[in-house]
Image (cartoon, rainbow, N blue to C red):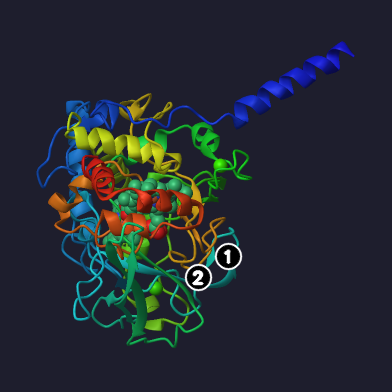
Amino acid sequence: MHKYFIVFLCLLVALFITFTPSEDTFVLDSPLSGGDTTVFNTSREAFAKPAPNLSVEDLRKFTFGNKMFNTNWVTAPASVTSLDGLGPTFNRVSCSGCHFKDGRGRPPKDRQEAMASMLIRLSVVGQDKFGGPKPHPHYGGQLNDRSILSVPVEGRAEVTYEEVPGVYPDGETYSLRHPIYTFKDLKFGSLDDALFSPRVAPVVYGMGLLEAIPEETILSFSDIDDVDGDGISGRPNRVWSPTKNKEALGRFGWKANAVTVEEQSAGAAVGDIGITTSLNKNQNCPDIQKSCQNAKHGGVPEMSDMQLDRMVFYLQTLAVPARRHLDDPNVQAGAKLFVKAKCSSCHRPTMKTGDHALKQVAFQDIQPFTDLLLHDMGEGLADHRPDFQANGREWRTPPLWGIGLVKTVNRHTTLLHDGRARNLEEAILWHGGEAQSSKQSFMKMNKDERRQLITFLESL
Ligand SMILES: [Ca+2]
Ligand SMILES: [Ca+2]
Ligand SMILES: [Ca+2]
């Protein structure tokens, strides 16, 4: 009897620990978004700085990695054989082409402009053998709108917008632009039955810190059955990890569909630039694309392990910019409203990283403003394209650290996975699903409060 009672008590304690809402949803009064990796810089280079805790030796690696990230890959065979193998089909010739100044991409300004810093993921209904999206038989996993000479481009996508007006309870009006995508110049048949997901390039600083957040911490944010009844659940994506050779917690990408910085980077190299690595040995050429398959490649693999390693190191140690204007009363009021409107239930303000192979990012107190979990964001934002465990309405909470500096670095303010929001206010107004009541809290605020919340976001 006694034994069972102890077991019962333990269960009770476990339940209590699991279901007590965590207390860490207040906003810290500290500028150090990235712990010891924080950099104080508000210039156009704010996203491009090495973490201040790097050694001289580390800085050499960082500089090499920086070069790899900025390299313009060229068609094989070229005189510089270490940097050839572009394509045959691709989207950009460098990583920084999309992640300009280590910042974020945007949709084209008009129909004439090409998609220069975003891409369209493609698939068909079903799953591949790893539980991921099933690549389109003719176009693969994404639409490659550029190619080397002698190989045709796959096609391109155009986006136009429809304005849909709305009104706040206090009478103020707004307008949201709904994107409409059309495929043009398709070389290998129609994409009418394809599932597709337009995605802009996100910022790439703080990647090592995100990688170092303990899995238990991320899982502790999850409330799959919404036991606390606040309408917010959140669940992890579990995706296939080729380097771990098993399913693992996804952290990177708009649907948390990549496990490590290395896997994300190697995937980008082959998918976006056409550069193979030891992680992705095959050229990005679906069976039907014969001239793609027959084109000359740039070695096996085209990017060496050393080159990949340095590039990953670079991304892992890019500094996070510090928060600003902490003593501005509007920023302080905005921080309180951020918690009151439960933005902080998904955009988790503070956490501590755990151990990591890179000691510079281990055990840091950080302010990423994300839980790295998937949330149902409603029909408005849905892409209807599953990505491992993420369904067509779910998106990973994007980190908000540094978001106020995007305007300075990238000279635009577009937000959300496809850049449809033209500013912070519109980004909030698109929130639905699990974030519906949070959005409503924002809408019910008076004009000054709404302004304060936005001023707070701009200070991150
Ligand atoms: Ca290639
Ligand atoms: Ca393709
Ligand atoms: Ca909940």
| Rendered-image quadrant of the C terminus | top left
Q: Within 8 Å: ligand 2 and the Cβ of disc 2?
A: no
Q: The disc labelled 1 sits on which kind of residue?
A: Asp
- For disc 1, the neighbor class at 10 Å (few under 14, some 14 to 19, many from 20) is few
In this figure, what is the number of numbered marks?
2
- Using the rendered image of the protein, determine whether residue 315 is visible from the camera's viewpoint: yes
Comparing 231 with 56, the one in front is: 231
- Label 1: element kind: loop
- Label 2: element kind: loop
Query: Could you tell which of marks 2 and 1 lies nearer the N-terminus?
Result: 1
- Using the rendered image of the protein, determine whether residue 301 is visible from the camera's viewpoint: no
Comparing 236 with 433, the one in front is: 433
Residue at image coords 50%, 29%: 22
| Rendered-image quadrant of the N terminus | top right
Residue at image coords 28%, 65%: 174
Q: Within 8 Å: ligand 2 and the Cβ of disc 1?
A: no
* Mark 2 vs 1: CB contact within 8 A: yes
Q: Which disc, if any, is residue 135?
A: 2
Comparing 434 with 450, the one in front is: 450
Position of residue 164 measured from the top left corner of the image (x, y, whole percent): 34, 73
* Left or right position of 344 against 245: left
* Left or right position of 438 against 65: right
Residue at image coords 24%, 58%: 423
Q: The disc labelled 2 sits on which kind of residue?
A: Pro
Q: Which residue is mark 1?
A: 128
Position of residue 266 measured from the top left corner of the image (x, y, whole percent): 37, 54
Q: How far is the residue under mark 2 from the one under mark 1?
A: 7 Å
Position of residue 354 measured from the top left corner of the image (x, y, whole percent): 43, 27
Comparing 201 with 137, the one in front is: 201
